[in-house]
Amino acid sequence: MKLYLSSFSLGAFLYQTHLSSAWTSKHSILRRTMPRSGVVMSAGGTVETREDSASTNMRYLTGIADVAKDHEVFLLDMWGVMHDGSTPYEGVLETVQKLKDAGKKLVILSNSSKRRDNSVKMLHKLGFDPNDFDQIITSGEVAYRMLAGDETLECETWSTLSEIRKDGVDSRKVFVFGSGAEDEEYCTSSGWTLAPMEEANLILARGTFTINDGTGNVVKKTEDEGEYFRVLQKSLEVAASRKIPMLVSNPDKVRPDKGLPPMPGAIGDAYESKLEDGEREDLVKRIGKPFKEVYDLALCDHQSDPSIACMVGDALETDVTGGSRVGCTTVWVVKDGIHGPAIMEKGSGSHEPGSVDVLKEFNVKDGTYAEGSILSPDICLPHFRW
């Protein structure tokens, strides 16, 4: 029996990729890993159960002003912190200006699979001055420069991709899971030719709306959802049989929209579910938060002391996990963005108890980018306001 849904729901994606129904809730993760241990070692060396390990040490503040005095650099997520996809959140424009006036270094750190110029246009559209930001880093820009073999990129590159490039122009054939916007131009301008999965030497996952194999027959989810999922399933099976490497240019697994629709990170997880354990690390590369490359770029002047930087984000799995890994102070924005509805529901309208419950749920969830560690944001803010 096939399942056809009227929207690109996580349940439909799970069904079509033949993953277990245990992962079918809208907050689930599409990645299978071994269950975590029932106990963890805390920073102080004491043993505690996973259920009790969600941080009770989060500082609840009403604004970023108290944080600003102790930090020089602010790494800012965009969607879910600064805007809702179309409108800036209340007070954010003023907050950015106050941080800038205080002499802080501001860095946009976005998991957008599009290039930097797109984020610059978005900032303009929303009323921000892009010149207020010392850097504007998107995962799509970093991935593009890797595809193009840009030797000026000041972060670690992917050896698998470098090897394909070394084989010459004829080997640079890519199959694209795309957004439908500029997918082909993105690839061809970086020196790659779109190709069917049977001929491709690389898969690029940059969107969850189209499938493009370069033959001119672009499969669009908005036109035929059933066909989209059929081709998606078949493509991943062929890719797994050929052991084709996949570059994921947006590690987000869900988007902070109604229903939390899947993002390219979910395709990466679905592909990994078809690979053997020893193949996953070699064949799937994610560029963006929470992974190292974008933080190396953002903190290139401050890697000796990342504690002077704050990672401000709404997503536990990407923003908070990434900031924690590199040693930044982590500021979790809870009433806007991806966890906001669940937090307010669980807290019966209060974000403090709701945030504790959502954090506890995250820390016992298998298959997240947190890789079995216990996540503990340093600071909890209702909104990104001064």
Image: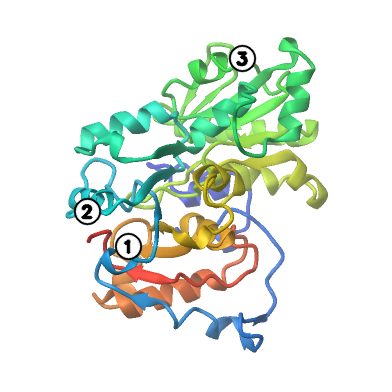
Nearest to the eye among marks 1 and 3: give it.
1
Q: Is residue 345 among the parts visible in the rendering?
A: yes
Who is closer to the viewer here, 386 or 28?
A: 386
Residue carrying label 1: 68
The residue at 48%/36% (across/down) is: 208
The residue at 51%/20% (across/down) is: 186
Which of the two labelled residues, at mark 2 and mark 3, occupies the earlier sequence position?
Answer: 2
The residue at 52%/46% (across/down) is: 301
Which of the two labelled residues, at mark 1 and mark 2, occupies the earlier sequence position?
Answer: 1
Residue carrying label 2: 98
Task: Identify the disc placed on residue 191.
Answer: 3
- SS for dot 1: helix
The amino acid sitting under disc 3 is: Gly
What whole-number distance in Å separates the C-alpha atoms at marks 1 and 3? 43 Å
Choose top left, top right, bottom left or bottom right for residue 60: bottom left
What whole-number distance in Å separates the C-alpha atoms at marks 2 and 3? 42 Å
Residue 177, horizontal then vertical, whole percent: 55, 30
Residue 350, horizontal then vertical, whole percent: 26, 77
Choose top left, top right, bottom left or bottom right for residue 116: top left
- SS for dot 2: helix
The amino acid sitting under disc 2 is: Lys
